[in-house]
Image (cartoon, coloured by chain):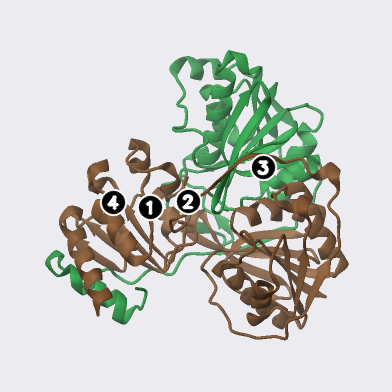
Chain colours: A brown, B green
Amino acid sequence: MAVLIYLENWDGKFKKLSFELVSYASKIAEMLGSQSLALTIGNVEEQELEKLSVHGADKVLHLKNEKLDTLDEQAFSNLVADVARKYNATVLVLSNNNSGKALAPRLSVQLKAGLVSGVSKLPVSVSPFVVYKKVYSGKAYANVQIKTDLKILTLAQNSFELIHNPKPYVVEHLNIQPSDNLLNTKVKEVQKLTGKVLLSDADIVVSGGRGMKSADNWGPLVELADLLGAATACSRPVSDEGWRPHEEHTGQTGKIIAPNLYFAIGISGATQHLAGISSSKIIVAVNSDKDAPIFEAAQYGIVGDAMKVLPKLVDAVKELKLR
Amino acid sequence: MKILVCMSNVPDTTTKVKFVDDFKKLDNNGIQWVINPWDELALTRALELKDDLGSGVQTVTVAHVGLAGSEPTIRKALAIGADDAIRINADAPDAYVVAAQLAEAIRNENFDMIFCGIESSDHNGSTVGGMLAEFLGCASVSCVSNVKLDAGGVVITRELGGSKEVVSVPYPFVAIVQKGIANEPRIAAMRGIMMARTKPIKVVEPRPLDSLTEVISYEMPVPRAACKFVEAENAADLISLLHNQDKVI
């Protein structure tokens, strides 16, 4: 019996979401009275692997093979399934990020294990196994029962607090070979997005909407983001107009994010936009229309012109940094 | 070359959802049903590829798992430009059953490319595309923001956290598509709407299959506390609240 955690690594490094995942899965292992095993594939240094035990992993499983430098969904899911069988996993936990979304569905079919994605809390009960998840893009929640012996969950990012739960560091280096006939993804070109805070990982996001009025007005918004170490984002009309790149679009058909703090500057708050940001812990809205629906979702609001309010926010943050 | 686009039928994204039967079922009353927004973008891209006469794309088919009530939404897809449709005549208790039914219905249809939207706006699962690929035993590429065809074959752009990669996979494959795959969903023209009436919808009877998960009950979100307003003149106070009280900056 074991709770198996699949952990992606980025050039051999883990991120906050990795430790959230270990914290979460180790709590489930406690609920079930079983062990938590943290599996990662790729070239990861020992001192990085050790960090997983700090958050409660009973054992680290490390699989290294130069054929696995690139995510191949078929090959990777086969390997994770092999490990799940070998260690008799009863729960398999992945992140609800890009790689988790790619692998969990394939694993569900291979292992005939019920999958619930995007969970944000510990299971409501373990017998029967019921989990709680957001549905209708945040307009409701569902309690979902998983009826199979093996359960697969993907955890929403930034939904579970890190737990400091040090365990002795135990590692097992696995020697499992991927099958060549499953390795079919050929990478032709890689473009690393470096030098800026990734929207999906950001604790703070500063986002602009139509109220920014033109592509030329983003200076103070970007400055505020830089001062706060935040990522920048935008609403759909802004990316449609080409004022900002489409990677920044947050909302129903764009990115779905859950930062600790979200600034909605000149965003009216259409349902489609709220669908992408409703899991943010704190929403701050700046809008010239006091009746804008964004104020219903926000904890803090300023009624005013974005162009006039932004410099004041920038100055206040600068002052805070000086203190 | 044949493209399949899988589509789900969802409440219009502006719907205020309500539940009946002691919070066990969605209240269908007054709901306007639409093509899932991501699937609509997937369909748009498939049609763009077909429009390019040199691409070799001959047909674009849509497939859907649902009862007869979802046919108006399928007709919309045909009006936008899909050539034909497959409807698997089953309720969809969970994503596993949806993917299994799709796989059984299309296994012998020899599609070269299968597009699935990254998520449906009802259960927000992000699961059917990957499951379908596994049932079919073929490659899948997730988080796809572009699919192009050139002389050398298919060129796919995927967006992993922190990097953008251009990859290729052998046919057949499932591409799970997201933002960027098409700019705007294509809108049905009058001619398309007329033509859609006579386009074929093949109805396939489902296999008996058990779901792996089951929704026990729904809940409404806890309403957020009322918004605290700060005067525009005193914007600096907001920053101190966020710093001292909420400790988020």
Query: Which mark is in front, 2 or 4?
Result: 2
Q: How far apart are marks 3 and 1 (CA)?
A: 25 Å
- Could you tell whether A175 is left or right of A9 in the image? right
Earlier residue among tags 2 and 1: 1
Residue carrying label 2:
A255
Query: Which mark is in front, 2 or 1?
Result: 1
- Could you tell whether A126 is left or right of A282 in the image? right
Q: Distance between the residues labelled 4 and 1?
A: 14 Å
Q: Where is residue A49 in the image (x, y as percent from the top left)?
A: 68, 73
Q: Which chain carries label 4?
A: A
Residue carrying label 3:
B141
Earlier residue among tags 2 and 4: 2
Q: Are marks 3 and 2 on the same chain?
A: no
Q: Do labels 4 and 3 share a chain?
A: no
Query: As shown in the figure, which amino acid type bears the numbered disc 3?
Result: Val
- Callout 3–callout 2 Cβ contact below 8 Å: no
Query: As shown in the figure, which amino acid type bears the numbered disc 1?
Result: Ala
Q: Do labels 2 and 4 share a chain?
A: yes
- Classify the position of the N terminus of chain B by image quarter: top right
Q: Name the one closer to the observer, A145 or A322.
A: A322
Residue carrying label 1:
A233
Q: Distance between the residues labelled 4 and 3?
A: 35 Å
